[in-house]
Amino acid sequence: MLARAVFWGAASALAWTHAGYPLAARALARRRARRVRAADWTPSVTVVVAAHDEEPVIERRLENLLALDYPPDRLEIVVASDASSDRTDELVEAVAARDGRVRLLRCERGGKVAAQNRAVRETGGEIVAFTDANATWAPDALRALVRTFADPDVAYACGRLQLERADGTNREGAYWRYELWLRESESLLGSITGGNGAIYAVRRDDYAEVDARFGHDLSFPYLMVQRGRRAVYEPAAVAFEKPTPTIESEYRRKVRMFEHCWAITLEGEMLRRLPPLYLVQILSHRVLRYGSGLLHLALLAATLRLAGAGGVYRSALAAQAAIVAHAAARPGLPRYYTLVTAATATSLWRYLRSGVPATWDKAEGTR
Protein backbone atom coordinates (compact mmCIF):
# COMPACT_ATOMS: atom_id res chain seq x y z
CA MET A 1 0.00 0.00 0.00
CA LEU A 2 1.37 3.41 -1.02
CA ALA A 3 0.56 5.11 2.31
CA ARG A 4 2.55 2.51 4.25
CA ALA A 5 5.54 2.88 1.90
CA VAL A 6 5.45 6.66 2.30
CA PHE A 7 5.12 6.39 6.08
CA TRP A 8 8.03 4.04 6.59
CA GLY A 9 10.17 5.69 3.93
CA ALA A 10 9.75 9.19 5.38
CA ALA A 11 10.16 7.97 8.98
CA SER A 12 13.32 6.03 8.07
CA ALA A 13 14.82 8.98 6.17
CA LEU A 14 14.19 11.35 9.08
CA ALA A 15 15.60 8.90 11.62
CA TRP A 16 18.68 8.36 9.45
CA THR A 17 19.52 12.01 8.80
CA HIS A 18 18.99 13.13 12.41
CA ALA A 19 20.30 10.15 14.39
CA GLY A 20 21.42 7.14 12.34
CA TYR A 21 23.91 8.91 10.11
CA PRO A 22 25.58 10.95 12.90
CA LEU A 23 26.05 7.79 14.99
CA ALA A 24 27.31 5.79 12.01
CA ALA A 25 29.73 8.57 11.05
CA ARG A 26 31.11 8.71 14.59
CA ALA A 27 31.56 4.93 14.73
CA LEU A 28 33.26 4.79 11.33
CA ALA A 29 35.51 7.75 12.16
CA ARG A 30 36.82 5.88 15.19
CA ARG A 31 37.77 2.92 13.02
CA ARG A 32 39.31 4.73 10.04
CA ALA A 33 40.30 8.24 11.08
CA ARG A 34 42.18 10.24 8.46
CA ARG A 35 43.90 12.88 10.53
CA VAL A 36 45.25 16.16 9.20
CA ARG A 37 49.05 16.40 9.08
CA ALA A 38 49.09 19.82 10.70
CA ALA A 39 52.21 21.79 11.61
CA ASP A 40 53.04 25.21 12.99
CA TRP A 41 53.85 27.35 9.96
CA THR A 42 53.09 30.92 8.98
CA PRO A 43 52.36 31.47 5.28
CA SER A 44 51.20 34.87 4.11
CA VAL A 45 47.50 35.29 4.85
CA THR A 46 44.84 37.64 3.52
CA VAL A 47 41.81 37.94 5.79
CA VAL A 48 38.72 39.12 3.93
CA VAL A 49 35.77 40.75 5.70
CA ALA A 50 32.80 41.21 3.37
CA ALA A 51 30.72 44.06 4.80
CA HIS A 52 27.53 45.90 3.96
CA ASP A 53 26.53 48.70 6.34
CA GLU A 54 28.47 47.35 9.32
CA GLU A 55 29.09 50.65 11.10
CA PRO A 56 28.17 49.31 14.57
CA VAL A 57 30.75 46.49 14.54
CA ILE A 58 33.44 47.08 11.92
CA GLU A 59 35.93 48.92 14.15
CA ARG A 60 35.71 46.21 16.79
CA ARG A 61 36.14 43.54 14.12
CA LEU A 62 39.30 45.14 12.76
CA GLU A 63 40.85 45.67 16.18
CA ASN A 64 40.21 42.02 16.95
CA LEU A 65 41.91 40.89 13.74
CA LEU A 66 44.87 43.22 14.25
CA ALA A 67 45.43 41.75 17.71
CA LEU A 68 45.72 38.17 16.44
CA ASP A 69 48.77 36.12 17.38
CA TYR A 70 50.21 36.03 13.87
CA PRO A 71 53.36 37.61 12.36
CA PRO A 72 52.37 41.17 11.36
CA ASP A 73 54.42 41.06 8.17
CA ARG A 74 52.53 37.94 7.04
CA LEU A 75 49.03 39.32 7.55
CA GLU A 76 46.85 41.47 5.31
CA ILE A 77 43.26 42.48 6.21
CA VAL A 78 40.87 43.59 3.50
CA VAL A 79 37.35 44.90 4.06
CA ALA A 80 35.36 44.34 0.87
CA SER A 81 32.61 46.90 1.33
CA ASP A 82 29.56 45.89 -0.68
CA ALA A 83 28.36 49.43 -1.48
CA SER A 84 27.97 50.36 2.18
CA SER A 85 25.89 53.51 2.63
CA ASP A 86 26.65 54.19 6.31
CA ARG A 87 30.03 55.07 7.92
CA THR A 88 31.58 51.62 7.32
CA ASP A 89 34.02 52.84 4.66
CA GLU A 90 35.01 55.90 6.67
CA LEU A 91 35.74 53.84 9.77
CA VAL A 92 37.79 51.29 7.83
CA GLU A 93 39.86 54.03 6.24
CA ALA A 94 40.56 55.53 9.66
CA VAL A 95 41.92 52.20 10.92
CA ALA A 96 43.89 51.72 7.68
CA ALA A 97 45.56 55.12 8.20
CA ARG A 98 46.90 53.85 11.53
CA ASP A 99 47.87 50.35 10.43
CA GLY A 100 49.10 49.46 6.96
CA ARG A 101 47.87 45.88 7.24
CA VAL A 102 44.29 47.09 6.72
CA ARG A 103 42.82 48.34 3.48
CA LEU A 104 39.39 49.12 2.13
CA LEU A 105 38.10 47.69 -1.12
CA ARG A 106 34.96 49.48 -2.30
CA CYS A 107 32.70 47.25 -4.36
CA GLU A 108 29.52 47.81 -6.32
CA ARG A 109 26.47 46.22 -4.72
CA GLY A 110 26.64 42.61 -5.81
CA GLY A 111 26.38 40.56 -2.66
CA LYS A 112 28.78 38.83 -0.33
CA VAL A 113 30.26 36.34 -2.78
CA ALA A 114 30.89 38.96 -5.46
CA ALA A 115 32.75 41.09 -2.90
CA GLN A 116 34.77 38.08 -1.76
CA ASN A 117 35.66 37.14 -5.34
CA ARG A 118 36.97 40.62 -6.04
CA ALA A 119 38.96 40.69 -2.80
CA VAL A 120 40.67 37.42 -3.73
CA ARG A 121 41.51 38.69 -7.21
CA GLU A 122 43.10 41.86 -5.81
CA THR A 123 45.18 40.35 -3.00
CA GLY A 124 48.12 37.99 -2.80
CA GLY A 125 48.20 35.94 0.40
CA GLU A 126 49.03 32.25 0.05
CA ILE A 127 46.06 31.50 2.28
CA VAL A 128 42.82 33.48 2.07
CA ALA A 129 40.75 33.50 5.25
CA PHE A 130 37.20 34.80 5.54
CA THR A 131 35.10 36.06 8.40
CA ASP A 132 31.88 37.91 9.19
CA ALA A 133 31.89 41.51 10.35
CA ASN A 134 30.06 40.61 13.58
CA ALA A 135 32.34 37.71 14.55
CA THR A 136 35.21 37.74 17.04
CA TRP A 137 38.25 35.45 16.79
CA ALA A 138 40.23 34.01 19.66
CA PRO A 139 43.82 35.35 19.67
CA ASP A 140 45.28 32.08 18.33
CA ALA A 141 42.41 31.34 15.92
CA LEU A 142 44.23 32.23 12.70
CA ARG A 143 47.38 30.36 13.65
CA ALA A 144 45.30 27.27 14.50
CA LEU A 145 43.33 27.53 11.27
CA VAL A 146 46.38 27.99 9.05
CA ARG A 147 48.33 25.08 10.53
CA THR A 148 45.97 22.64 8.80
CA PHE A 149 47.33 23.78 5.42
CA ALA A 150 50.69 22.27 6.24
CA ASP A 151 48.97 19.12 4.99
CA PRO A 152 49.22 19.38 1.17
CA ASP A 153 45.91 17.54 0.73
CA VAL A 154 43.94 20.24 2.57
CA ALA A 155 42.37 22.91 0.39
CA TYR A 156 39.74 24.30 2.78
CA ALA A 157 39.45 24.50 6.55
CA CYS A 158 36.79 25.95 8.82
CA GLY A 159 37.08 26.66 12.51
CA ARG A 160 34.73 26.21 15.44
CA LEU A 161 32.04 28.86 15.74
CA GLN A 162 30.96 29.20 19.36
CA LEU A 163 27.59 30.89 19.72
CA GLU A 164 27.12 33.21 22.64
CA ARG A 165 24.07 32.81 24.84
CA ALA A 166 20.97 34.09 23.06
CA ASP A 167 19.22 37.15 24.51
CA GLY A 168 15.85 35.43 24.15
CA THR A 169 14.33 32.05 23.34
CA ASN A 170 16.55 30.86 20.49
CA ARG A 171 17.80 27.27 20.86
CA GLU A 172 20.28 27.40 17.98
CA GLY A 173 23.13 26.79 20.42
CA ALA A 174 21.90 23.27 21.24
CA TYR A 175 21.60 22.38 17.58
CA TRP A 176 24.99 23.92 16.78
CA ARG A 177 26.77 21.78 19.38
CA TYR A 178 25.25 18.70 17.74
CA GLU A 179 26.30 19.97 14.31
CA LEU A 180 29.92 20.52 15.40
CA TRP A 181 30.04 17.03 16.92
CA LEU A 182 28.98 15.61 13.56
CA ARG A 183 31.37 17.89 11.67
CA GLU A 184 34.29 16.52 13.69
CA SER A 185 33.37 12.98 12.61
CA GLU A 186 33.07 13.99 8.96
CA SER A 187 36.47 15.66 9.03
CA LEU A 188 38.05 12.49 10.41
CA LEU A 189 36.41 10.51 7.61
CA GLY A 190 38.09 12.77 5.06
CA SER A 191 36.07 15.93 4.46
CA ILE A 192 33.22 17.91 5.99
CA THR A 193 30.01 18.62 4.08
CA GLY A 194 29.54 22.24 5.21
CA GLY A 195 31.41 25.12 6.81
CA ASN A 196 30.49 28.41 8.47
CA GLY A 197 30.96 32.02 7.50
CA ALA A 198 32.52 33.19 10.76
CA ILE A 199 35.90 31.48 10.35
CA TYR A 200 37.23 29.56 7.36
CA ALA A 201 40.12 29.64 4.94
CA VAL A 202 41.14 28.28 1.56
CA ARG A 203 44.43 27.83 -0.18
CA ARG A 204 44.65 30.53 -2.86
CA ASP A 205 45.38 28.02 -5.60
CA ASP A 206 42.18 26.15 -4.66
CA TYR A 207 39.84 29.15 -4.48
CA ALA A 208 36.77 28.85 -6.71
CA GLU A 209 34.59 31.70 -7.93
CA VAL A 210 31.15 30.20 -7.41
CA ASP A 211 27.76 31.55 -8.42
CA ALA A 212 27.13 34.72 -6.42
CA ARG A 213 23.87 33.22 -5.10
CA PHE A 214 25.51 30.11 -3.67
CA GLY A 215 27.90 31.18 -0.92
CA HIS A 216 30.97 29.36 0.30
CA ASP A 217 29.69 27.49 3.35
CA LEU A 218 28.01 24.67 1.45
CA SER A 219 29.61 24.93 -2.00
CA PHE A 220 33.31 24.99 -1.11
CA PRO A 221 33.57 21.65 0.75
CA TYR A 222 32.04 19.52 -2.01
CA LEU A 223 33.89 21.45 -4.74
CA MET A 224 37.19 20.66 -3.05
CA VAL A 225 36.30 16.97 -2.81
CA GLN A 226 35.28 16.91 -6.48
CA ARG A 227 38.82 18.11 -7.24
CA GLY A 228 40.40 15.36 -5.16
CA ARG A 229 41.21 17.71 -2.27
CA ARG A 230 40.15 17.83 1.40
CA ALA A 231 37.85 20.19 3.33
CA VAL A 232 38.45 19.84 7.06
CA TYR A 233 37.31 21.11 10.45
CA GLU A 234 39.77 22.55 12.98
CA PRO A 235 38.10 22.91 16.41
CA ALA A 236 41.11 24.73 17.89
CA ALA A 237 40.39 27.73 15.63
CA VAL A 238 37.62 29.40 17.64
CA ALA A 239 35.32 32.26 16.66
CA PHE A 240 32.45 33.78 18.61
CA GLU A 241 29.21 35.19 17.27
CA LYS A 242 25.91 36.37 18.65
CA PRO A 243 22.87 34.32 17.52
CA THR A 244 19.49 35.75 16.68
CA PRO A 245 17.52 36.39 19.88
CA THR A 246 14.34 34.34 19.38
CA ILE A 247 13.25 31.12 17.73
CA GLU A 248 11.02 33.15 15.42
CA SER A 249 13.91 35.34 14.27
CA GLU A 250 15.99 32.19 13.78
CA TYR A 251 13.22 30.80 11.59
CA ARG A 252 13.43 33.87 9.34
CA ARG A 253 17.23 33.55 9.18
CA LYS A 254 16.95 29.88 8.30
CA VAL A 255 14.47 30.58 5.50
CA ARG A 256 16.92 33.01 3.90
CA MET A 257 19.82 30.59 4.41
CA PHE A 258 17.98 27.53 3.08
CA GLU A 259 17.00 29.39 -0.09
CA HIS A 260 20.68 29.50 -0.99
CA CYS A 261 21.10 25.86 0.08
CA TRP A 262 18.32 24.80 -2.29
CA ALA A 263 19.94 26.76 -5.13
CA ILE A 264 23.23 24.94 -4.55
CA THR A 265 21.55 21.55 -4.14
CA LEU A 266 19.43 21.84 -7.29
CA GLU A 267 21.75 23.86 -9.52
CA GLY A 268 25.27 23.36 -8.18
CA GLU A 269 25.98 19.81 -9.42
CA MET A 270 26.93 18.86 -5.88
CA LEU A 271 26.39 15.12 -6.42
CA ARG A 272 28.75 14.75 -9.39
CA ARG A 273 32.22 13.13 -9.27
CA LEU A 274 32.13 12.36 -5.56
CA PRO A 275 33.78 9.35 -3.90
CA PRO A 276 31.16 6.85 -2.66
CA LEU A 277 31.60 7.59 1.05
CA TYR A 278 31.41 11.35 0.59
CA LEU A 279 28.36 10.94 -1.64
CA VAL A 280 26.64 9.13 1.24
CA GLN A 281 27.69 11.95 3.58
CA ILE A 282 26.24 14.63 1.29
CA LEU A 283 22.99 12.76 0.78
CA SER A 284 22.63 11.96 4.49
CA HIS A 285 23.69 15.27 6.04
CA ARG A 286 22.66 17.79 3.42
CA VAL A 287 20.06 16.55 0.93
CA LEU A 288 17.91 14.69 3.47
CA ARG A 289 18.34 17.44 6.07
CA TYR A 290 17.21 20.14 3.64
CA GLY A 291 14.32 17.90 2.62
CA SER A 292 13.22 17.26 6.21
CA GLY A 293 10.24 19.61 5.93
CA LEU A 294 8.95 17.71 2.90
CA LEU A 295 9.60 14.40 4.65
CA HIS A 296 7.59 15.54 7.67
CA LEU A 297 4.69 16.63 5.46
CA ALA A 298 4.74 13.26 3.70
CA LEU A 299 4.91 11.48 7.05
CA LEU A 300 1.96 13.44 8.42
CA ALA A 301 -0.16 12.80 5.33
CA ALA A 302 0.58 9.07 5.45
CA THR A 303 -0.07 8.94 9.19
CA LEU A 304 -3.46 10.59 8.80
CA ARG A 305 -4.33 8.10 6.08
CA LEU A 306 -3.27 5.12 8.23
CA ALA A 307 -4.36 6.27 11.69
CA GLY A 308 -7.58 4.30 11.45
CA ALA A 309 -5.55 1.08 11.38
CA GLY A 310 -4.44 1.79 14.95
CA GLY A 311 -1.21 0.45 16.40
CA VAL A 312 2.01 2.22 15.45
CA TYR A 313 0.20 4.62 13.11
CA ARG A 314 -2.11 5.96 15.79
CA SER A 315 0.87 6.30 18.16
CA ALA A 316 2.81 8.15 15.47
CA LEU A 317 -0.07 10.57 14.96
CA ALA A 318 -0.29 11.20 18.71
CA ALA A 319 3.47 11.84 18.88
CA GLN A 320 3.35 14.34 16.01
CA ALA A 321 0.37 16.12 17.55
CA ALA A 322 2.15 16.31 20.91
CA ILE A 323 5.24 17.90 19.37
CA VAL A 324 3.20 20.51 17.50
CA ALA A 325 1.11 21.25 20.61
CA HIS A 326 4.25 21.72 22.72
CA ALA A 327 5.78 23.94 20.04
CA ALA A 328 2.66 26.11 19.93
CA ALA A 329 2.35 26.35 23.72
CA ARG A 330 5.80 27.60 24.72
CA PRO A 331 9.38 28.18 23.53
CA GLY A 332 11.79 25.27 23.68
CA LEU A 333 13.45 22.63 21.53
CA PRO A 334 10.13 21.33 20.07
CA ARG A 335 9.29 24.84 18.80
CA TYR A 336 12.83 25.32 17.52
CA TYR A 337 12.75 21.99 15.66
CA THR A 338 9.26 22.62 14.27
CA LEU A 339 10.06 26.07 12.92
CA VAL A 340 13.48 25.18 11.53
CA THR A 341 11.99 22.15 9.82
CA ALA A 342 9.21 24.33 8.41
CA ALA A 343 11.88 26.72 7.14
CA THR A 344 13.27 24.00 4.85
CA ALA A 345 9.92 23.71 3.08
CA THR A 346 9.14 27.44 3.07
CA SER A 347 12.54 28.22 1.57
CA LEU A 348 12.03 25.67 -1.21
CA TRP A 349 8.70 27.26 -2.09
CA ARG A 350 10.25 30.74 -2.17
CA TYR A 351 13.20 29.51 -4.23
CA LEU A 352 10.95 27.83 -6.80
CA ARG A 353 8.62 30.84 -6.95
CA SER A 354 11.08 33.73 -7.17
CA GLY A 355 14.67 32.43 -7.11
CA VAL A 356 17.43 33.59 -4.79
CA PRO A 357 19.03 37.06 -4.72
CA ALA A 358 22.80 37.43 -4.59
CA THR A 359 22.61 40.23 -2.01
CA TRP A 360 21.92 39.50 1.63
CA ASP A 361 20.43 41.08 4.72
CA LYS A 362 21.96 40.90 8.18
CA ALA A 363 20.24 38.56 10.59
CA GLU A 364 18.27 40.56 13.13
CA GLY A 365 19.71 40.94 16.60
CA THR A 366 23.19 39.64 15.75
CA ARG A 367 25.11 42.94 15.99
Image (spheres, rainbow, N blue to C red):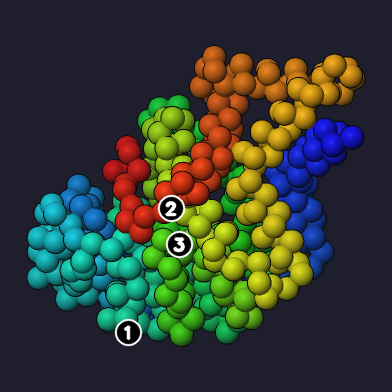
* Residue with the mark numbered 1: 124
- Three-letter amino acid code of the residue under disc 2: Gly
Judged by depth in the image, the label closer to the viewer, 1 or 2, is 2
Which comes sooner in the sequence, label 3 or label 2? Answer: 3
Which comes sooner in the sequence, label 1 or label 3? Answer: 1
- Three-letter amino acid code of the residue under disc 1: Gly
Reply above or below: 362 against 159.
above
**Marks 1 and 3, how far apart at CA:** 24 Å
* Residue with the mark numbered 2: 355
- Three-letter amino acid code of the residue under disc 3: Phe
Q: Quadrant of residue 87?
A: bottom left
Image coords of residue 22 (percent x, y) = 72, 50
Judged by depth in the image, the label closer to the viewer, 3 or 2, is 2
Image coords of residue 208 (percent x, y) = 46, 76
* Residue with the mark numbered 3: 214
Judged by depth in the image, the label closer to the viewer, 1 or 3, is 3
**One can see residue 41 in this view:** no
In percent of the image, x 68 and y 35: which residue is there?
296
Quick check: 110 left or right of 26? left
In percent of the image, x 50 and y 75: which residue is there?
147
